[in-house]
Amino acid sequence: MKAPALFAALLALGQTPVSAQDTATATPPPAATDKGEPLPPGAPSAPYELSGWCYGALDEYLAVYERVKPDLRAIDKAYGSSVKNEKEPYASDIVAYRKELKVIAGSVEAAEKASPTPLQERGAAAIKGGRAIWSPVETKTNRELARAWLSWGLPDRCDSNARELAASSAVLGQALKYNAPEEAPPPAETPATPK
């Protein structure tokens, strides 16, 4: 019987064994290292949905950047900027956030691959919810949008959640593969008889 491998893998992660379907949606305890930008009210707390939400919010943030670049330059010119020697305003921040977006996307994909049930619908809804946080300010002027862009920060929980989700998904995926029924070898071909 191979079922103990799944339970052993979950116990190794310090989690109580739950059904495989619940692992991507179980609410984790808050990470002790998450200090800084908190999750806004209404953000999901389940790991998979939170990663989807974070992906949507960050992806929209990067899309908004393209719209507000001229206003960012104007704001920096009028008020000064702590960012120096960059051709594009906040270019180093954008590079870092694009890397973070890949980490979050990887965690979503890993959870989907490791799940025995389809998660994509819930993920699409979570991504849409993350993008939606920008909707109220996107109806404002570009200058107001640029100010909102400057003051926004990806919640710290997004990074730690994505890394935890990817790690637990890798372990769960291995356990599910281990516990999967073995495939029967293909039947041997019989040689054709000459006529």
Image (cartoon, rainbow, N blue to C red):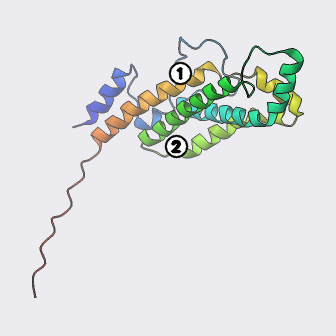
* Residue 160: numbered disc: 1
* Neighbours of disc 1 within 10 Å: few (<14), some (14-19), many (20+): some
* Residue at (53, 11) in percent of width and height: 32
Q: Is residue 152 left or right of residue 173?
A: right
Q: Which residue lies furthest to the bottom in this view?
A: 195
Which element is circle 2 on? Answer: loop
Q: Taking 75 as reference, is 108 above or below it?
A: below
Q: Report, in whole angstroms, how far the alpha carbon at label 2 lies from the one at label 1.
A: 21 Å
* Residue 119: numbered disc: 2
Q: Is residue 180 left or right of residue 37?
A: left
Residue 27 visible in this rendered orientation of the protein: no
Q: Which of 178 and 149 is in front in this view?
A: 149
* Quarter of the figure with the C terminus: bottom left
* Residue 182 image position (x, y, % from top left): 24, 48
Amino acid type, mark 1: Ser
Q: Which residue lies furthest to the left in this view?
A: 194
Q: Taking 92 as reference, is 104 above or below it?
A: below
* Residue at (81, 32) in percent of width and height: 68
* Neighbours of disc 2 within 10 Å: few (<14), some (14-19), many (20+): some
* Quarter of the figure with the N terminus: top left
Which element is circle 1 on? Answer: helix
* Residue 192 image position (x, y, % from top left): 13, 78
Q: Earlier in the sequence, mark 2 or mark 1?
A: 2
* Residue at (34, 22) in percent of width and height: 11
Q: Taking 59 as reference, is 193 above or below it?
A: below
Could you tell me how many numbered marks the image carries? 2
Amino acid type, mark 2: Leu
